[in-house]
Amino acid sequence: MVKPTPMEEKLKYSLLRDLNDSQSIWTRNEKRTWFLTLLAGTCMLYSTRTTMPLLVPAVASERKWSKTDSGTVLSSFFWGYTLTQVLGGYLSDKFGGQKVVLLSAIGWSLITFWMPNIITSASYLSSYSIPFIVAVRIVNGACQGVHFPSMISITSQNLNASERTSFFSILTSGSALGTLLTGILGSFILDYFGWPTVFRVIGFLGLSWTLFLRYYTMATDRNRIINLSQPSRICSKLGHSETVPWLKLFGRTSFWACVLSHACEMNCFFVLLSWLPTYFHENFPHAKGWVVNMIPWLALPPVTILGKALTEALISRQWSLTKIRKLVQSFCFLGQNAALFIMCHTEQFNTALACMSIIIGLSGFHNNAVTVNPQDLAPSHSGSVFGLMNTVGAIPGFLGVYLAGHILELTQSWSAVFSTAAAINTVGWFVFTIFGSAEAII
């Protein structure tokens, strides 16, 4: 049997589409290439994002930062992160997420690479040193803010509806891989070479990924064949995008349930993401850095896959998608709250490490529920809707992270930080359980 050429395979995938489906579609090889590329990109995104939380104890000690200063520097990333979510989704839906991801990746990779110079230069600005670093961190957050809206737009435009949720939810596990990379490699470099080298190495890896994206993966799009059953789509996608009916979305409680529950979960996730290294450094100073920065994040990829398998199993049993989303999200919120309660009362390292692993791991269920809910509610505008959802979700990022630093400055109590996160989780659980839905709005 003669093996089909790549061009023949592209043509087959184009012609064997549902006549009502007006989108282009990836071939099997393209799907594999883009999956690995976007997974690696999400990995590098989170690797650069978690570099500052890992290094802030060392930098703060050297630069004499207070807890409030550290909290301000950590939280300022999310100030910028909120600014570009909707814009990133809109530009991706209009012009293609590939270009948006590439340009933003160049920005956050270069900022990470130059961060040692930025921190050193800031020391000469006296009272303006912290504001200067904060301004750079805001720009860094703005660059990273477009990544997930762009990625969900890319998957929505190039995959069948039945594939999008599982494909995107697994891509989100790249966040754990990136945090693991920083935790393992970063901790090793920190111990032997100092904190400036960590920024250099992680930034260089990010720049290397942008070169791979530009000169290998994006090159596969040059010979794409668009679905021939709807040729007008080719022209309509260039320079034109249907307006998102925001008012219709804003009038539905299911949309706000998605947005608010995502914000509640992100508060817990971002607080731990930013303060976890400091927590273990202060409470268990003899613990190995690579252990506390690696073990908790090992739980996220398998739980994400478990959430995907559970969702598919319940769908095969004819469960409604709304019930599935609520059940999976409930596992996330309730399990995290139980672990946070134990964290408030434990003084044992192994117990604290296990609880942190449970809390971070269970966010994998969130990745299979609320995170993919925009594709349920607005399949044709998922990039823009996800951008808005992530904008609101990032607000607890800077408020929660800053508030945690302020609480620690005033009370020296980690229990207060964990109790606050649990209370906010409870609000998110009630809202999504009562008002959440997977029924399409637009």
Image: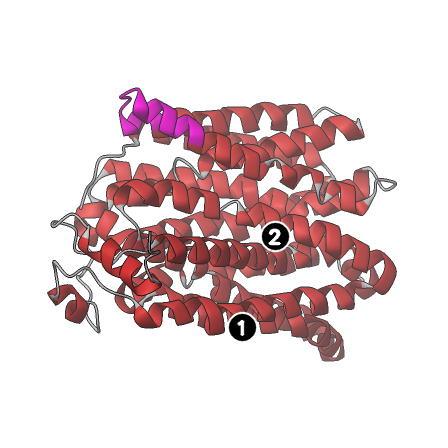
Badge 2 marks a residue whose secondary structure is: helix
Q: Quadrant of residue 192?
A: bottom right
Q: What residue appears at the point 27 percent right and 34 percent down from the top-left corner?
A: 438
Q: Mark 2 and 1 residues: CB-CB less than 8 Å, in contact? A: no
Q: Which residues are magenta?
A: 309-324
Q: Is residue 342 above or below residue 129?
A: above
Q: Mark 2 or mark 1: name the one nearer the start of the chain.
A: 2
Task: Verify whether residue 314 appears in magenta.
Answer: yes
Q: What residue appears at the point 54 percent right and 53 percent down from the top-left corner?
A: 398
Residue located beneath label 1 in the image:
211
Which amino acid does the dot numbered 1 rest on? Leu
Which amino acid does the dot numbered 2 rest on? Gly
Give whichever of 408, 104 is nearer the camera. 104
Colouring style: secondary structure
Task: Verify whether residue 261 appears in magenta.
Answer: no
Badge 1 marks a residue whose secondary structure is: helix
* Residue 289, percent from left and from top: 79, 46
In this rendering, does residue 436 appear at all? yes
Give whichever of 413, 300 is nearer the camera. 300
Q: Nearer the viewer, mark 2 or mark 1?
A: 1
Residue 154 falls left or right of residue 348: left
What is the count of numbered marks? 2
Q: Is residue 114 above or below residue 418?
A: below
Residue 216 falls left or right of residue 232: right
**Label 2 – label 1 distance at C-alpha:** 18 Å
Q: Residues within 10 Å of mark 1 (few under 14, many from 20)?
A: few
Q: What residue appears at the point 26 percent right and 25 percent down from the top-left corner?
A: 320
- Which numbered circle lies on residue 178? 2
In this rendering, does residue 406 appear at all? no
Residue 266 falls left or right of residue 430: right
* Residue 416, percent from left and from top: 65, 34
Q: Is residue 407 above or below residue 380?
A: above
